[in-house]
Image (spheres, rainbow, N blue to C red):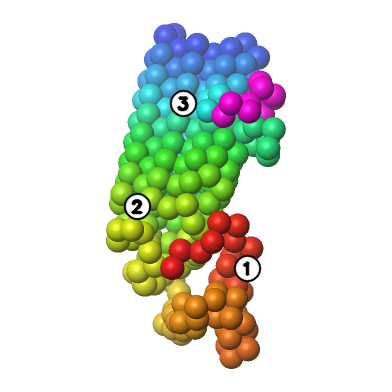
């Protein structure tokens, strides 16, 4: 089906637009933009150069995608901002494109990005994530699949957020948050397993018990490396346990405790 483009929208002649997209009034679509099919851009949406968007996304008023990075090292190099499919990107969300560091900012599919949140240059956001109002990610943050991050959280550059986490509103961290946990309180710290989230995602009681046992062993040790070794020596290393081990062993900014 043909695209529905408001006469009050601007679409650069070099932009590549798929089929059956709705582009509302006062939208601005720059050159070097490629989008798929069945996307809906409400009024006043900006797709800056470097936007690469899939299909079936809904973008709400005031959102700006592939903005110029807020990084003084950026020198105008050609980079992109890649958005997957089936995302809901709410009012005034801003997502920067990449820099020479990685060349790409990436948001996966089936995410809900709530009003006024910001994703900085070279971040990688997974799939099926929910990110709350006014939460801000500095550059090169990685968020794994199925993370739930509440409103007004702040994340230091290069931090890694594990999958299936629940993070309390207003939290701030400069450390990595491992998978399957609740992180909260003030200052932010490990606050148990995300039991509700794990059950909703179909984790069995046996799997949840195994994850709990692993974290009990890991956090019981003063040195995380010793806790990881005990897990390897005494537990069946399922894919869930291997994910925890790999996450902690590769952490660059230390693990939340």
Q: Nearer the viewer, mark 2 or mark 3?
A: 2
Tell whether 168 sits left or right of 211. Answer: left
Instruction: Answer whether residue 75 is magenta in the image.
Output: yes
Q: Which residues are magenta?
A: 71-84
User: Quick one: SS at disc 2?
Assistant: loop
What residue is disc 1 on? 249
Q: At 68% from the left edge and 39% from the top edge, which residue is drawn? A: 102
Q: Which mark is residue 61?
A: none
Choose between 112 and 58: the one closer to the eye. 112
For this view, does 207 lie left or right of residue 188?
Answer: right
Q: Position of residue 93 (x, y in %)?
A: 41, 32
Which is nearer the N-term, disc 1 or disc 2? Answer: 2
Q: In the depicted view, which residue is nearer to us: 5 or 10?
A: 10
- For label 1, the SS is helix
Give the answer, above or below, for where 56 lies relative to 31. Answer: below
Secondary structure under the numbered disc 3 in the rendered image: strand
Quadrant of the image for the C terminus?
bottom left
Q: Within the magenta stretch, is there residue 76?
A: yes
Tell me which numbered mark, 2 or 3, is placed earlier along the sequence. Answer: 3
Give the farthest residue toward the front: 222
Residue 5, placed above or below residue 162? above
Which residue is labeled 2 in the image?
A: 171
Q: Residue at x 44, y 36 (%)?
A: 118
| Residue corresponding to mark 3 | 64
- Residue 235 percent coordinates (x, y): 58, 88
């Amino acid at each position: 089906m043909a695209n529905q483009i408001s006469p009050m929208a601007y679409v650069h002649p070099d932009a590549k637009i798929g089929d059956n997209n709705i582009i509302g009034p006062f939208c601005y679509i720059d050159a070097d933009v490629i989008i798929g099919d069945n996307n809906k851009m409400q009024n006043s949406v900006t797709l800056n150069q470097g936007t690469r968007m899939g299909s079936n996304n809904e973008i709400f008023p005031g959102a700006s995608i592939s903005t110029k990075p807020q990084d003084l090292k950026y020198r105008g190099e050609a980079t992109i901002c890649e958005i997957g499919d089936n995302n809901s990107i709410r009012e005034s969300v801003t997502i920067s494109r990449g820099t020479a560091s990685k060349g790409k900012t990436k948001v996966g599919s089936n995410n809900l990005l709530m009003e006024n949140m910001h994703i900085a240059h070279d971040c990688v956001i997974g799939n099926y994530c929910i990110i709350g109002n006014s939460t801000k990610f500095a550059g090169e943050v990685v968020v794994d699949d199925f993370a739930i991050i509440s409103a007004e959280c702040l994340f230091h550059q290069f931090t890694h957020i594990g999958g299936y986490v629940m993070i309390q509103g207003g939290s701030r961290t400069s450390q990595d948050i491992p998978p399957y946990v609740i992180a909260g309180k003030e200052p932010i710290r490990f606050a148990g397993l995300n039991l509700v989230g794990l059950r909703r995602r179909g984790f069995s009681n046996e799997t949840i018990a195994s994850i709990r046992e692993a974290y009990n062993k890991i956090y019981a040790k003063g040195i995380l490396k010793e806790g990881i070794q005990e897990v390897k020596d005494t537990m069946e290393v399922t894919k869930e346990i291997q994910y925890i081990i790999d996450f902690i062993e590769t952490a660059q900014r230390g693990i939340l405790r």
